[in-house]
Image (tube, rainbow, N blue to C red):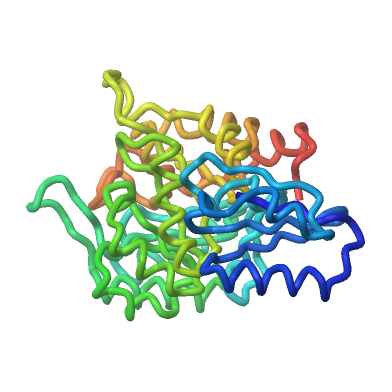
Amino acid sequence: MIVIVKPQAPQEKVNEFIQWIESQNFKTHVSTGDYSTIIGLIGDTSRLQEDQLLSYDIVEAVKKVTEPFKQANRKFHPHDTIVPVGDSGLKIGHGNFAMIAGPCSVESEEQVIGIAKLVKQAGATMLRGGAFKPRTSPYDFQGLKADGIKFLLEAKQETGLPIVSEIMNINHLPLFEDVDVIQVGARNMQNFELLRELGKTNKPILLKRGLANTIKELLMSAEYIMSGGNENVILCERGIRTFETTTRNTLDLSAVPVLHELTHLPVIVDPSHATGVARYVKPMAMAAAACGADGLIIEVHNDPIHALCDGAQSLLPEQFADVAGAVNAIRIAAGSAR
């Protein structure tokens, strides 16, 4: 349920109303815009009567929110959320575009620092790299773990690029203290215990859509994080599993405008995991920019043929530079560059 407050309502009266709502064991989410204030009520609102709320002279209207996701809902928060990335000054959302690039997996100190320098020159604003790698086969490379995080932090020190890395287990959370954005991979999208713990942090969380999950389920996973108090959630469309086998997954670009309609959270796209084929990354990245994505996360490797993980979908640094240029041109043409 949302309550729309009348314009120019005295703040003292608004505060009194919020205190009364919270005294009835509801949580509130307040969104203040240029022309109106919206108060979201979180809890079992079936016991509240609309007439009871409308009796307050500061209340203009009361509306039911039927969707199960509340805090992620644009009805609760009409304006786009802008997610700040640590103390870097970078932001994601509402025209602030993130260009995240780097290797699927951190393989060595030299490798990740070298790639970090090259992708920064090519236009990346953040560095991605996997220290913990969920793999289908238990015999595949599983990542360098704590050493991988260490090497990413060294790359950050060398280049100034904020870092993004995937967490797999709640117990690993202390290792991510200096990681700027924590990624929740597709396989963990519905690891609700992990999501609850991440809700207790104040770090940006990059939440990837699961292999076979609906948009609604993605938003409900975001709700788990936000219900814990962390509103810095970035959604990521990375392709879903369909009957098509030509590409690794089927990139659902329609999810981008749909999500922008349903939620205020930023939405980025991963064309690397979506297609699984390096030569398809550029057209899909351009299409993602054209349909309004708030950023891209792209795999880049200095030697894809010998990569320990996902070499087939990784771009060379010079290929990434070409993609970055094409994406910027699309955004300028669309009038969304910032």
Residue at 60% across / 33% down in the picture?
257
Name which residue lies at 51% across and 78% down.
157
The residue furthest left is 139
Q: In terms of image quadrants, where is residue 304?
A: top left
* Residue found at x 43% / y 42%: 315
Judging depth in this view, the residue of 81 and 67 nearest the camera is 67
User: Looking at this view, is 284 or 319 the one in front?
Assistant: 284
Q: Position of residue 250 (x, y in %)?
A: 38, 27
Where is residue 151, by image quadrant?
A: bottom left
Q: Is residue 153 above or below residue 206?
A: below
Q: Is residue 316 left or right of residue 50?
A: left
**70 above or below 143?**
above
At 13% from the left edge and 51% from the top edge, which residue is drawn? 140
Q: Residue 193 location in percent, x, y?
A: 28, 63
Image location (x, y in percent) of residue 101: 48, 53
Residue 184 position, x and y percent, is 36, 57
- Viewed as shown, does residue 113 lie left or right of 20? left
Total labels drawn: 0
Residue 222 located left or right of residue 26: left
Tell me if residue 244 can be seen: yes
